[in-house]
Structures are given as C-alpha cells and as structure tokens.
C-alpha cells in the first residue's frame, strides 16, 4: 500500500517552507502526486466607514494582496516540487475549508511545518481543524519540518473509533516500518483490557504484513502525550499514530487532551485521524 495523492497548503511565506519541503519529499518517497493548494481569504473590515469610501479602497487593496499572496504560494510550491508529479489549485476561501474540500481527491494531508505562533485563520489551515473537518488522515510535521523516515513508529492505542481509523489510515507507513510499537496507556484498572486489545491489534496488523509489539503501561490522562513521546524517543521513532479528538474538540482545548497536547508540543511527526 502507498499514498497516491498528498495534499498540502502552500504559502509564499518563508515560515511555510518546511511544510512544503516535507510534503514534497514525502511525495517523492511514496511515488505520489503532490497536490498543492493556495487558499487565502480577505479579512473583515475592522474600521467604521459610514460613507463606504474607505471600504471600497480597502477591498481593492486586500484583493490585490490576496492575489499576490496566492501567486507567491504557487511559485513556492513549484520551486519545492520541481521535477515530480504535481497539481496546483488556488482558491479565495478560508484555508481549512478549501483544504477540506480539496481532500476529496487526496489520501493524506500534510500540515504543520511552521512556527507555533498565532495562526491567522484567513491565511493558515489549522491542523486540528483539518483533522475534524477533512475526513482524511492528517500528518502534522514538527515546526522545522524535516524528512519523515517512519522506520520506527509508535501507535497510540485506545479502543475508540478514532484510534481504529488511525490504525487503518497509517497502514502504508506501518507496512514499510522496521519496528512498530502499539502503546496502550491506561489507568490501573484498565491494564487487563488493554493487554487483550493490543493483542488483537497486533494479530490484525500481522495479517497486513506488519510486525508489531505491544506496550501497556499505567499512565494518568494528563501525562499520556508526554509518555507517548518518551516511548517514541526510546526506540528512535519519528512518527506517532493516534486517533484525533476522541472527545469534542472544544472540551480538549478547554480541559486538555492527548490530541491538543501533541499539537501544542510537536516533538516529532504525528499522524492523526478522526
């Protein structure tokens, strides 16, 4: 198995270059078509203008800026993807909405790969939003990007719909990996169930040609993301596979959760499915 089409949001900003380079390299490694999408939208007018003169001038100026930004995004995408199979499209829309619609023809979305700063939703596609709106697996790159090797992979297991979906979505990576650890981090009274579940998961993976081992440990919920990163570091894994937002996204951002913590502290690549 392999991903045949990889979708990435392209921007002309230097800060987005790591994401484009990561996506281009992954497409080359997978033998996939790289689908670049430039998407940006005019922000609402924030000043009062009862006569409409300033509004008209502002709209013209903003439209020109968006057009220039989309041209710069295309140029950056073409530079990073030179010599490989690729497609380009541009849209004047909120990036996350445009990306979700474009993902209908994609197997995988590459997100992240940019500094962790305030994200302007009119110019940047938020990875968390993509996870819950696209219906596609989202590979979130670390802020500095880099090449995903996925020779060693940690699968965060919890018996939920999202985790099962992530397991299936990650098969192209898991089948090519040298080592896969299925990690179930649970409360003390959940160890027996977790051991049974991970045994089932490993048997299922074996039928797809994936050799995996299980690791079950007692870990309180607030420490799960840190422990996943610890397990990954211990075996030298550069990829964590996880279900995304098992609780509502609002609850995760207010009260905390594994997905939120993985996105806020991206130490390595994370593949998320919802």
Image (tube, rainbow, N blue to C red):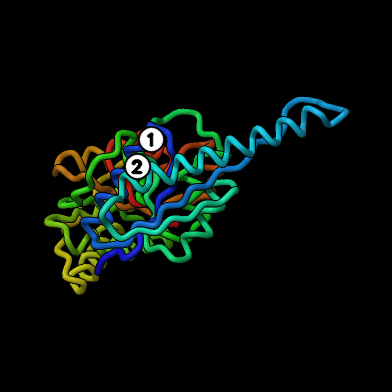
Left or right for 174, reference 249: left
Q: Percent from the top left, x then y, of residue 73?
A: 44, 42
Whether the residues at callouts 2 and 1 have beta carbons within 8 Å, the answer is: yes
Which quadrant is home to the N terminus?
Answer: bottom left
User: At 50% across and 29% down in the image, what residue appears?
Assistant: 118
Q: Is residue 188 visible?
A: no
Q: Percent from the top left, x then y, of residue 269?
A: 29, 44
At numbered mark 1, what does the secondary structure look like: helix, strand or loop?
loop
Query: Does residue 253 lie above or below 194 as drawn?
Result: above
- Marks 2 and 1 sit apart, C-alpha to C-alpha, by 7 Å
User: At 34% across and 57% down in the image, what residue appears?
Assistant: 34
User: At 23% across and 50% down in the image, what residue appears?
Assistant: 154
Q: Percent from the top left, x then y, of residue 22?
A: 29, 45
- Looking at the image, tell me whether mark 2 or mark 1 is earlier in sequence order: 2
Query: Does residue 101 lie above or below 119 as drawn?
Result: below
Crowding at label 1, few (<14), some or many (≥20) Cα neighbours within 10 Å? Answer: many
- Which residue is denoted by mark 2 in the rendering? 19
Crowding at label 2, few (<14), some or many (≥20) Cα neighbours within 10 Å? Answer: many
- Which residue is denoted by mark 1 in the rendering? 114
- Give the camera-side residue of 172 and 70: 70
User: At 18% across and 49% down in the image, what residue appears?
Assistant: 149
């Amino acid at each position: 198995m392999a991903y045949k089409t990889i979708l990435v949001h392209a921007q002309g900003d230097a800060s987005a270059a790591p994401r484009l380079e990561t996506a281009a390299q992954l497409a080359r490694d997978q033998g996939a078509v790289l689908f670049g999408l430039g998407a940006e939208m005019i922000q609402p007018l924030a000043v009062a203008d009862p006569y409409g003169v300033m509004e008209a001038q502002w709209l013209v100026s903003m439209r020109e800026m968006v057009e220039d930004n989309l041209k710069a995004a295309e140029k950056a995408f073409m530079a990073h993807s030179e010599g490989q199979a690729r497609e380009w499209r541009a849209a004047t829309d909120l990036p996350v909405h445009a990306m979700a619609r474009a993902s209908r023809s994609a197997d995988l979305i590459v997100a992240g790969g940019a500094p962790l700063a305030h994200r302007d939703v009119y110019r940047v596609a938020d990875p968390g939003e993509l996870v819950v709106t696209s219906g596609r697996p989202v590979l979130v790159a670390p802020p500095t990007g880099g090449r995903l090797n996925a020779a060693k992979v940690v699968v965060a297991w919890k018996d939920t719909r999202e985790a099962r979906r992530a397991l299936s979505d990650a098969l192209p990576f898991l089948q090519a990996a040298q080592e896969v650890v299925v990690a179930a981090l649970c409360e003390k009274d959940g160890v027996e169930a977790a051991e049974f579940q991970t045994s089932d998961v490993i048997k299922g993976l074996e039928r797809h040609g994936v050799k995996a081992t299980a690791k079950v440990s007692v870990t309180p919920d607030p420490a799960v993301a840190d422990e996943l990163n610890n397990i990954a570091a211990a075996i030298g894994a550069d990829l964590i596979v996880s279900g995304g937002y098992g609780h509502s996204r609002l609850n995760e951002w207010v009260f905390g959760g594994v997905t939120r913590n993985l996105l806020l502290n991206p130490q390595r690549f994370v593949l998320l499915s919802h």
